[in-house]
Image (cartoon, grey):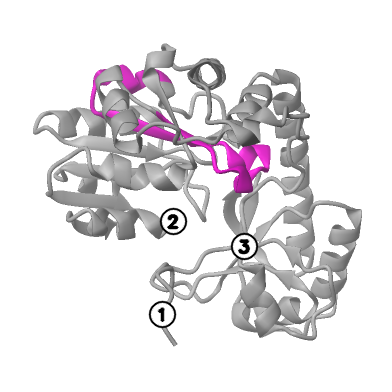
Amino acid sequence: MAMSPYSGFLPHGGDLGTARQQFPQAPEPFIDLSTGINPNPYPLPELPSGLFAQLPQRSALDRLIAAAARFYKASSADHVVAAPGTQILLPATTALLPRGRAAVLGPTYSEHVRVAALAGHDTKQVGELHDLAGADLAIVVNPNNPDGRIVPPPALLAIAAKLRSHGGLLMVDEAFVEVAPAGTSLAGEVDRGNIVVLRSFGKFFGLAGLRLGFALAAPAITTRIAAWLGPWAVSGPAVGVGEAALADAAWAQSTRERLCRDAQRLDELLSQSGLEVIGGTPLFRLSRCPAAKELFEHLGRAGILVRRFPENPTWLRFGLPADEASWTRLRTALGSRSPD
């Protein structure tokens, strides 16, 4: 049988198809706690049918980018480029530089290392911030996935200054910054010229399947990224939904408050169940458990998928349950596990 062109991708959360194969007797519906996606998404607005039948209009894209500039506090719309998800912005950003040395602050989301290497960079994962300074391309996820580590903006700006001295570029993936403390983002600092900030739409707004994301950078860089993406990169429906969601400040504020409450509730449940909570963000919690593999399988048999980390076999990451029925199933499954 021919190999799928997607078979070389690294495993990530959200793969319910594989989970159902691994746990065929699990009860339905399967509860997916393996991602950091808001389980209560932004309510979809009614969309005119023309958004599906016509090519995206430039005027609509301009409105989306203006809404994104306001929401992300960019200096202007010229500092923002829209894309079909931040995943596609990884190769677009790594292509800004000729082949050189790339350093990724880890442990973190595995795609950054994979994509930087695919672009031809001599790529390594480093454990300390100062190890980024000698790279041509430095990549930081802030807040980090999966442990929630936050690098203070002054420390990142100091790295950016060192990189600037030899023509280097700092890419900061702020996929989870919507639920981080105020002042964490570097969105207002991209005019320094060698900083690219990636902002995910799907995680906070809970609409990952829409495929929408943004790069924030100096206009000279956003112009290059837009040219790399080409025309009509973002679908008409994504443009329409994104514009509405990014303009809804009341929903965003109430959602941040709810996510923080739910994260605290999840911490309490995990701690009561004998797990050590060692990090995370309000969208996911990272726990340590000596019998993590056994607990992963126990939860899978109960129809609950969480995130494992083969490179850290005592870690399990839990996303937020969507409703009371899911909370109850998680509590019951954790309570019925065998002692470590």
Asked if one can make out residue 92 in the rendered structure from this viewpoint, the answer is: yes
- Identity of the residue drawn at 76% across and 29% down: 45
| Residue 97 as seen in the image, left or right of residue 197 | left
Q: Nearer the viewer, mark 3 or mark 2?
A: 3
Residue receiving disc 3: 14
Q: Earlier in the sequence, mark 2 or mark 1?
A: 1
What x and y, as percent, mark residue 300? 72, 77
Nearer to the camera, 318 or 122: 122
Residue receiving disc 2: 109
| Cβ atoms under marks 1 and 3 closer than 8 Å | no
Task: Identify the image quadrant of residue 326.
Answer: bottom right
Residue receiving disc 1: 3
Q: Is residue 194 magenta?
A: yes
What x and y, as percent, mark residue 207? 66, 43
| Cβ atoms under marks 3 and 2 closer than 8 Å | no
Magenta stretch in the rendered image? 188-215
Which amino acid is tagged 3? Gly
Nearer to the camera, 11 or 152: 11
Instruction: Kindly report the distance in space between the C-alpha atoms of the residues bearing marks 2 and 1.
Output: 25 Å
Q: Is residue 145 magenta?
A: no
Instruction: Kindly report the distance in space between the C-alpha atoms of the residues bearing marks 1 and 3.
Output: 22 Å
Nearer to the camera, 138 or 21: 21
What x and y, as percent, mark residue 233? 44, 36
Asked if one can make out residue 127 in the rendered structure from this viewpoint, the answer is: no
Numbered circles on residues, count: 3
